Image (tube, helix red, strand yellow):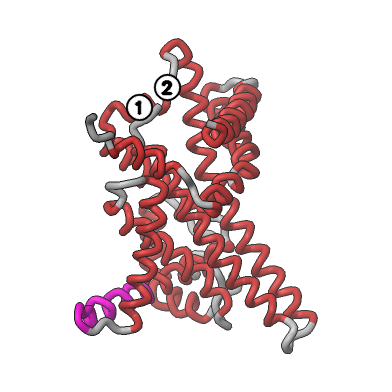
Amino acid sequence: MPEQLWFTEILNHLFAAPATSLLRTLHIEPKYPAAPISNSFSMEVLVFAFLLVLFLLLRSRLSVDRPGALQHAFEGVEGFIQGQSEEIIGHHSEGYTAFLAVLALFILFCNLIGIVPGFESPTAVPIVPLGCAICAFIYYQSQGFKHGGIGYLKHFLGPMPALAPLMLPIEIVSHLARVLSLTIRLFANMFAGDMVTLVFFSLVPIGFPIPFLGLHIGVSLLQTYIFVLLTTVYLQGAVSEEH
Amino acid sequence: MPAPDPTPDRENSGRKESFWVQAARYSQLAFILPAALVVGWLIGTALDRWLHTTWLYLAGILLGIVAGFVELIRTFLRDAK
């Protein structure tokens, strides 16, 4: 039986049987049939539920005349991401803000949940950053097709038609490498941040780990920013007219 | 004299990236080269298993290295313009 966080234990206690039968329906045999829900998945569910409650709370308190602190905070996040995508993509970037903001908030809370005692960062497990990177990949490719139609495929064929058979596999590998690059960067930084905090906490439990918790928060913010920024850069490449 | 078209200026000003955008773009160069190599190797290995060959993983690695360098050179050229 794997080591489980208290929240994972609750989820496994409630949903182990349906989760195992669902996996078996999909011809996947779980490693631990009594506990098929992993810590990283349960932390993702927790972040998802937290964001959902936060958005519902925000929606119920929206006010044009008297915006509250929560509304100000989220307007700040939205404005920052909007400004960023305006700088990179240019005009007509408003349509991408919703996806980028949700991606940023999800990754940020997944990173930060690790500093709460009793929880751990799901982004310190490779499968979670990989999921986020695949979402970003699917989104920017779909926006490329939506914006350029079938002509978007020209992005994969290079500038000269004669070189197209050579450029196509190169471009495919290059685009798939972006997914791996996004995944490894986020995973490695969060894993290293967790390990450093854990090592210093086990050496000197009082006082000394606090700077490293601060470092963890800094790394969490920076990695979220870089992930969203690079997704915006890839979006710009997909929806731009040049090539 | 006709008024100048504002669109090219706006386009040009849109290309001036801030320090943070350029930093993020360059930071990915450290990852993109090994990532492209690994992706090429994975694709080659998958093709080897599918087609029962033994050499496609090498072709995949070479393709990954080329793809990594193409991305690297493209990023440098974009900023050198």
Is there a contact, CB below 8 Å, between mark 1 and mark 2?
A: yes
Q: What amino acid does circle 2 point to?
A: Leu
Q: What amino acid does circle 1 point to?
A: Leu
Q: Position of residue A208 (x, y in %)?
A: 75, 83
Direction top: furthest residue: A162
Disc 1 is placed on an element classified as helix
**Magenta region includes residue A50:** yes
Image: B58 above or below A210: above
Local packing at callout 2 (Cα closer than 10 Å; few below 14, some 14-19, many 20+) is many
> Where is mark 2, residue-wise?
A157
Look at the image and give the residue range highlighted in magenta.
A49-65
Q: In terms of depth relative to the viewer, which is nearer, B72 or A84?
A: A84
Magenta part mainly helix, strand or loop? helix
Q: Position of residue A23 (x, y in %)?
A: 41, 57
Can residue A199 be seen in the rendering of this structure? yes
Q: In terms of depth relative to the viewer, which is nearer, A116 or A215?
A: A215
Q: Quadrant of the N terminus of chain B?
A: top left
**Magenta region includes residue A213:** no
Image: A164 above or below A186: above
Q: Position of residue A154 (x, y in %)?
A: 36, 24
Q: CA distance from mark 1 to mark 2?
A: 7 Å
Direction right: furthest residue: A203
Q: Residue at x 59, y 20 (%)?
A: B53
Q: In terms of depth relative to the viewer, which is nearer, B19 or A10?
A: B19
Q: Residue at x 47, y 53 (%)?
A: A229
Q: Position of residue A157 (x, y in %)?
A: 42, 22
Image: A53 above or below A171: below
> Where is mark 1, residue-wise?
A153
Q: Residue at x 35, y 65 (%)?
A: A78
Q: In terms of depth relative to the viewer, which is nearer, A176 or B73?
A: B73
